[in-house]
Structures are given as C-alpha cells and as structure tokens.
Image (cartoon, helix red, strand yellow):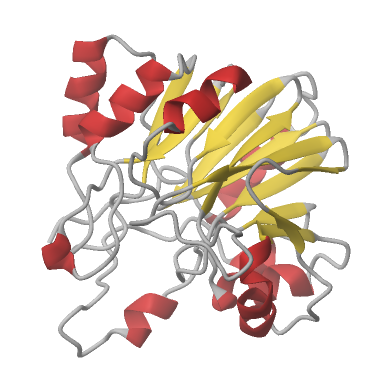
Amino acid sequence: MRWVKAKYKDEDFLSRVNTLSVLRDAVHIWWLGQSGYLLQWNGIHVLIDPYLSDSLTKKYAGTNKPHERISEQVIDPSRLDFIDIVTSSHNHTDHLDGETLIPIIAVNSAVKLVIPEANREFVSERIKMPLSFPEGLNENESININGIKFHGIPAAHNELERDENGRCRFMGYVIEIGGKKIYHSGDTLLFPGMEDILRPFNVDLAILPINGNDPSRGVAGNLNASEAVWLAKQIKAKLTIPCHYDLFSFNTVDVSVFIEEAKKMKIPFKVLEPGEGLSL
C-alpha cells in the first residue's frame, strides 16, 4: 500500500510555523492532511477542520469499512498550544474529531470554536464542553473574532441538509484574514446557485475537496477533480488548493487527476504535501 510521508512534521513543522510568525504582512497556510489547515496572520492562528488522530482507524478496525491511514500525521494536537480559533464544517469525525479538539482546547484556554449553529448540541457533547462554548453560524451570517471574519456558506454533503429551524448542518466558510479571502468548502457536492453565492466574495484562495462521490465507499461524497476545477474557474479564485485525499485508503483519489484538469482549464493552483505551507 502506498504511504504518503509528511514533508514537515513534529519539531520541523513547528519550527517553520514559528519562523514565519514574524512575517506579519502575509497570510501563511499549512496543510495538515485531509481537509485540515493551519492559518497564520499577525500572530493569530486559525485551525480549519483539523483531524490529527487515529480515532477513525481505531473505530472501524475489523469492520467492512476499515479507515486505513495512508499518510503520516503532521503534529500531535496537544503540541498546538498557540491556537486562537478552530473551525468545524460539519459533524463527521474527520472534520470534528474529539481526539483532536479536546487536547487542543486543553492547551488553549481562550480558543474559540466556529461551527454550524445547527450542530451545537452534537458538537458540545463530542468535545465535552458547555453548550455556550461554540460560536454558531448559519448561511448568510458572519462573525468577527480577533479581527478575522467568518462567513457561513451552505454545503451539500450529499444534500443541503437543514435542521428543524432551517439551519445548515453542512457548511463551508469564507474567511477574511489579512486582507485575503479564503474559501474552505468543507465537504460538498455542487448545488444550484453555489457559484453565484461565492462570486461576490472575489476569493483569493479556494480550498476544495477532490475525492469525488462514489456510493460504493459507503460514505457521503464530495466534488471530484473536474468539478472542483470548474467551481474554481466559475468563482474566479486566484489560487486553488485540492484537499480531502491521501488520508484513508478507501476514500481517496490520485491528485494527478486534479493537476491535469487544472492545467487543461488554466486555473492557478498549488498542490501541497502534508505539513507543507505557502504564503499569500
């Protein structure tokens, strides 16, 4: 089985984050694997959908849906003691992992957690925190934390699912940070009007899943490489990064498919290795 090594991990990863912390005019971003990213700007650190454990591998061991990890973990979550804000796009464990979030909360006493408001009770129970702890958002809503603005964007995984009050259970976020607008879609398929919602934001960076929607996997699906490229082109994203691949053997895709499509459609893109970063 193919094994994906982290480009930077542990002390090497932390050293690079620390070194760039003095360069405060740029937004720095690192891929942590799957849909997880670390953003850094002006001394503020934002974690997007981190999954930094083997909780799903343990949970599904010996079942007909083994979550066999195929990439190295970049960092132990208990070592991330400088985090100001964490986001979760939805309740699936690779986007809301108790074994990742509980250690992060333990070493960051003032951390804020941004979630879909519809998921408040589920989130609070999973992370063992009071109902009042998360900062909830819905579509067409925004929140400002430490000078960073989060806009709620609907996501279809596989449907535009809502609670009894009409609030989205699956979301993405447009994050305004350091003069840049970063769209992290969470897990989503295309849905009617999606590009129209996103165009007015003039996105600088789009982070989009590419693992596709294969019902035989037994899990909810995502954009495939062609769809991700199409969406990026439609919203005129200045740069696109693919995600949600190379974590579990049963639910991945070869990133070369995205690279070929992105070149064909002439969109600006960057493929990161686990632990690797870039600066905007």
Rendering quarter of residue 128: bottom right
Rendering quarter of residue 229: top left
Judge by depth and name the residue closer to the eye, 38 or 15: 38
| Visible residue check, residue 269 | no
| Residue 196 located left or right of residue 11 | left
- Residue furthest to the top: 266
| Residue 114 located left or right of residue 147 | left
Q: Residue 207 appears at what percent x and percent y?
A: 46, 35
Relative height, residue 239 to residue 165 (above, below): above
- Residue furthest to the bottom: 62
Q: Residue 121 appears at what percent x and percent y?
A: 67, 79
Residue at (42, 75) in percent of width and height: 54
Quarter that holds the N terminus: bottom left
Q: Residue 3 appears at what percent x and percent y?
A: 22, 56
Residue at (28, 9) in percent of width and height: 266
| Visible residue check, residue 6 | yes
| Residue 237 located left or right of residue 163 | left
Judge by depth and name the residue closer to the eye, 243 or 138: 138
Relative height, residue 238 to residue 232 (above, below): above
Quarter that holds the C terminus: top right
Q: How many discs appear?
A: 0
| Residue 222 located left or right of residue 278 | left
Rendering quarter of residue 49: bottom right
Q: Residue 117 appears at what percent x and percent y?
A: 68, 62
Judge by depth and name the residue closer to the eye, 270 or 207: 207
Relative height, residue 106 to residue 8 (above, below): below
Residue at (47, 18) in percent of width and height: 237
